[in-house]
Amino acid sequence: MKMQVVFSIGGRLRYVGHLDLMRAMQRALRRSGLPVKYSQGFNPHILLSFAAPLAVGIAGEREVMEVPLEQPVTEAEFLRRLNAVLPEALQCVAARQVDDTHPAPMAALFAAEYRITPLDNQQAFYDAAQAFLKLDSYMATHRTKRGERQIDLRPLVFNLLVKPEGLRAVLSLNQQGTCKPDLLLTALADLMGTPAPDCRIVRTRMLNHLLVPLENA
Amino acid sequence: MNPDMNTRLDKLLDQVEKPARYVGEEVGAISKAHTPDMGTMAFCFPDTYEIAMSHLGMKVLYDIVNRAPHLLCERVCMPWVDMADLLRQENLPLFSLETRTPLDQFQVVGFTLQYEMSYTNILEMLDLGHIPVKCSDRAEDAPIVIAGGPCAFNPEPLAAFVDAFVIGDGESATPQVMELVREKRAQHASRADILWALAQLPGVYVPLFYETAYHEDGTLASFTPTRPDVPARVRKRVEIDLDNAPFPESMVVPYAETVHDRIVLEIMRGCTRGCRFCQAGMLYRPVRERSVDKLMDLAEKLVAATGYDEISLSSLSSGDYSCLQELVTRLMERFKDQRVGLSLPSMRLDSLIKQTLEETSEVRKSGLTLAPEAGTQRLRDVINKGVTEQDLHNAVSDAFQSGWSSVKLYFMLGLPTETDEDLLAIGDLAKQVEDAYYAVPKGQRAPGLRITASASTFVPKPFTPFQWAAQDTLPEIGRKQAVLRSALKRKSTAFNWHEPELSFLEACFARGDRRLGDVLYAAWQRGCRLDGWQQHFKYVEWMAAFNDCGQDPAFYANRERSRDELLPWDFIDAGVTKRFLLRELDNALQGIVTPDCRQGCQGCGLTAFPGVCEQ
């Protein structure tokens, strides 16, 4: 039995890296006294499973993780006890108990939705987004630890929608291909012919292959 | 900090390495309102966040100050070079982690002096905080800059930069200093008045009120107060009743991974062993223990408040804590179900108890660290490290039988009277450890023997029997390292050594006088900062700084002092008397061992403090 938890992380805590966040969550769970399950072995720890790491500097509104449980606990109780020991900028917003056969969030994840708000040069940025959608293909340089490779970004961008609060982008995030927001920003800057504007980026939802939020699937 | 500056700072966080260092907002952090009636202090740690947050002293003082209703304490750490440069470029001030208050907005700016090679960071932090680096340049309303910690026992190299030093234990002294500054500021007292009032507090040294003169050979001729109403000698502060001294019941839990990321329980302060190279062993006298009941209570509260899964027992010599067995057993029993591990650092090898080892391994198996310090019995007698080869053999044999396979051995290179024979014997010790491992039958021992031998360069320190000794010159250290390297050429053994140039400078500042302030300033102006980090240590610039100021580093590091020389730190009463240190020096040179003072008073001088050393 496990608890699927939706949480938000924002404010300055967006600068906390994934491993640090995981440790902070584990410590919070220990403080909460909730009946979580520990791994076996010399260094027993809580095996948390996150849908996907969040890049440093990006906030998250509905991030998803799973917490293994030793004993059942109600969803309300879980939220109350965990939120009581979490800082303001890191809070759980929903929880539901799922059985062990429920696919891990990492496996179910297919895409993520972002809100990208440029701090200047907004109109040109949004125009570039519209132009990008009209392209059939856009080759970008993807840098990894193993080196550089060319990828077609266009099929990895499922949707771009200009909203009053910013650009709503649905980007592929799975084994087959991933478009991280910074890659999209570089592409849009290229179309604008200027350096990428400073943006505030928030990951707003984690989606499955039907583009349904994981917590509703 | 105003909203505009906040936004600009956030922008910097997008550009720097490890931004979590500058975020604050940790669980356990305390943000109090900066109301006009508050006494405020920025606790400055002159190294990066990861080091700062591993330091127990900061946790203790942070807790004490913030418990006081009219006082507040916030943390400030040395930014990494990328952040430091960006702050300067953007003309943004160094700020506190809790409320992002600029450094120059605090009444008191307090530095902890843990290591001589962090001194340039103090200058850098003051400058980044828009506080004039030199005391003499500070305006009336500038913060009062104070410093404490072990290096404050020879404050002279920092006399030009620090307004007041607090010598000894800081638990009662720190809030006293803050209360005084708060009251005086409320009365609009002048800066000179505040400093004078501080000089009246026990354990406080204000360099402004003292002057020095030098002989032609460069040695100190006199050190005298410039006014009759300041003390000629400054006696260190001692918390006599450690069990009732405040200790935090909650601790800041960092997001970024720190060096010691766990609950730290100080079980005991001071050490009775009397190792002659060890400054901490002399400075933190007398030995005081916390009771098991008190420690159990603290552990309970700290586990609940932090969620840490590890408790580390801290002291100079945990194996000497009189109730170690009981404490370890009760901690294990109490926290087994909560999966809280225990670690016992700083174990002297003669006090390793087999049972303790086994109990520790029940929960967590970390590496075994032993510090024989020297290769031969002769040299171990010189330094009064009362440990024999048999002790080492027993300790590692027990450990290997209990499933350990990695051992760290610490040695010092350049100890007084050391010869090549002593160095070669370190190789023999490593061989013996190897033999002890292979003596355990193959099925019963853990696979993969790993011996790590680390040799640091000996740095003579004030208030030790070796405070008169010369440090080996750099070429000699280089030669000795080569001898040691060849003696330790074994497959199982890795050899680590410290950068000798860094130890050379450490030796200069450890026993430096006021004139080194100019060198420090010149080095900082030449871009020296974060010297303790190998990638930023600029030895060439340091030597140029000495040259700029007409000072010779060898005078400070490599010169043997005569026994009647007036030493720059002689005006400080650290408890141990000069007579005792001289007797210990003579014993050292004759290879005479001085027993642990728990077995009988050795007359070090601490009995002059009422209420200590009753037995």
Image (cartoon, coloured by chain):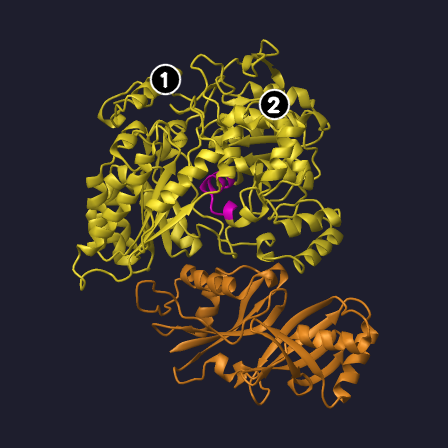
Q: Colour of chain A?
A: orange
Q: Is residue A154 magenta?
A: no
Q: Is residue A112 above or below residue B447?
A: below
Quadrant for residue A66, please give it: bottom left
Q: Is residue B549 above or below residue A110?
A: above
SS label for mark 1: helix
Quadrant for residue B378, please give it: top left
| Residue B266 in view, yes or no | no
Image quarter of the C terminus of chain B? top left
Q: Which residue is mark 1?
A: B582
Q: Is residue B542 left or right of residue B448?
A: right
Which badge, 1 or 2, comes first in the chain's sequence? 2
The residue carrying pointer 2 sits among few (fewer than 14), some (14 to 19) or many (20 or more) residues within 10 Å by Cα, namely some
Residue type indicated by callout 2:
Arg
The residue carrying pointer 1 sits among few (fewer than 14), some (14 to 19) or many (20 or more) residues within 10 Å by Cα, namely some
The image position of residue B498, as x and y in percent, is 45, 43
The tag on residue A80 is none
Q: Colour of chain B?
A: yellow
The image position of residue A88, as x and y in percent, is 57, 60
| Residue A215 in view, yes or no | yes
Q: Is residue B51 left or right of residue B9?
A: left
- Front-lying residue, A20 or B25: A20
Q: Chain of mark 1?
A: B
On whether disc 1 and disc 2 are found on a single subunit, the reply is yes
Q: In percent of the image, x 60 and y 78: which residue is there?
A: A205
Q: Which residue is mark 2?
A: B515
Q: Which residues are magenta?
A: B51-62
Q: Is residue B344 above or below residue B340?
A: above
